[in-house]
Image (cartoon, rainbow, N blue to C red):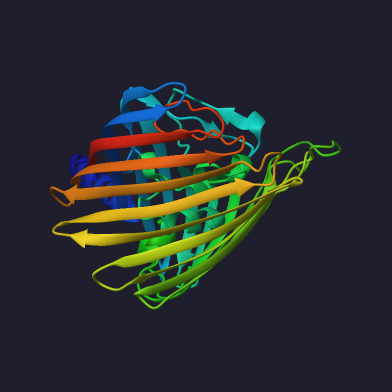
Amino acid sequence: MSAKITAMKAIVPAALAASLAGTAFAQSNVTVFGVVDLAVTRGSGSISNQTGLTSGQLAASRLAFKGTEDLGNGLKAGFWLEAGINADTGTGQATNTNNQVTGSAGGGGLTFNRRSHLSLGGDWGEIRLGRDFLPQYWNIAHYDPLDLSGTGTSQVLNSSIGGPTLVRASNSVSYLYGHGFNAAAIGYGPGGFSGSGFQFQATYYLGENPSGTETSKDGRGYGLRALYSTGNLTMSGAVGRTRYAAGDTRQNNAGASYNFGMVEVMGMYEWDRNGPLKARGWLAGVRIPAGVGNIRLAYSRYGSDAPGSPTAKKWAAGYVHPLSKRTALYTAVAHVSNEGPSASALNGAVTAPGKSSTGFDVGIKHSF
């Protein structure tokens, strides 16, 4: 009996160790990462000015978790949870639960408002479930040399009539494919596709409303994007539509960039609709290497056919100076001119319709 007990004592720890080792192997890659970005900002307008310490002027401050599990035969499962944070106050950011104006939730508390999805993928592509960026958003983001951040953010985004699904959607099902797709990059989004070739993303999302009502289809929509790249040249186009009883929103855009080595040029064009309201906008910009850093210049404009034809035009310039692979200093300045009833203002300033506004940032970004 004593020998049996001794054997059991040896077997149980070994089995437990093997079980724990199996668990560790199954969840092969879990990473905690994020960005803390803070800048001193100044905004000037015809009515009021504002000076402040602002979060996310070069890259959105965030806390994120991602992981993958190798299922064998080239198949991987993955998850991504990403929460936007206001680094200047320590608060979280609101999310949207149903892709409608009624769905805002969680402002001030930590929410995974930026991304929250589960994936399954391989060489055939990736299926993704949850909250994520929409295909039609990527053309606005990828062709802005100032990375859609801070005072220089493209006016195509700032003045958009796109509604609650301008950037992200909840309750979505997506399929992503890219030539040379790497299953190890599952969950990364378009940035997870490397090299040249063809890339594609299709997303369908739900408003999750009860049936039998006038608003039963509100918040339901889709987005499609196709991209082709040779390495230096990139071209892409996207369409999107979200249904609302008050009038559907439609978003369409196309963009291109070319890297000449000494300068990268880029531009995009947008045409939107919100119910009967129509709008158009565009951006042209360059990114120029300067020592270890780079200079960023852009001009963007956006206007609609609302009464008075509101239109906003913006010039923006910025410089980013990396101190290391994870830390960078930056500065940016921008000036927006308004026409008609447009009253777009920068960095918290307030300006009257038809008047202008100026913004300035100087800050530091650290990635971890």
Image point 24% across, 36% down: which residue?
A: 362
Q: Nearer the viewer, residue 273 or 13?
A: 273
Residue 104 in the image: state x and y as whole percent: 58, 29
Please state if 180 lies on the left or on the right of 162 as rendered.
left
Q: Residue at x 14, y 57 (%)?
A: 292
Q: Is residue 210 left or right of residue 165?
A: right
- Quadrant housing residue 251: bottom right
Q: Quadrant of the N terminus?
A: top left
Q: Residue 169 vs residue 332: left or right?
A: right
Instruction: Tell me which corner region of the image, top left, top right, bottom left or bottom right, holds residue 190.
Output: bottom left
Residue at coordinates 33% horizontally, 32% vertically from top-left? 55
All told, the count of numbered labels is: 0
Residue 248 x, y percent position in the rendering = 74, 47
Instruction: Give the residue furthest to the right.
Output: 212
Q: Is 282 in front, or is 219?
A: 282
Image location of residue 347, percent across then percent down = 39, 31
- Looking at the image, is 141 positioned above or below residue 180? above
Choose between 220 and 316: the one closer to the eye. 316
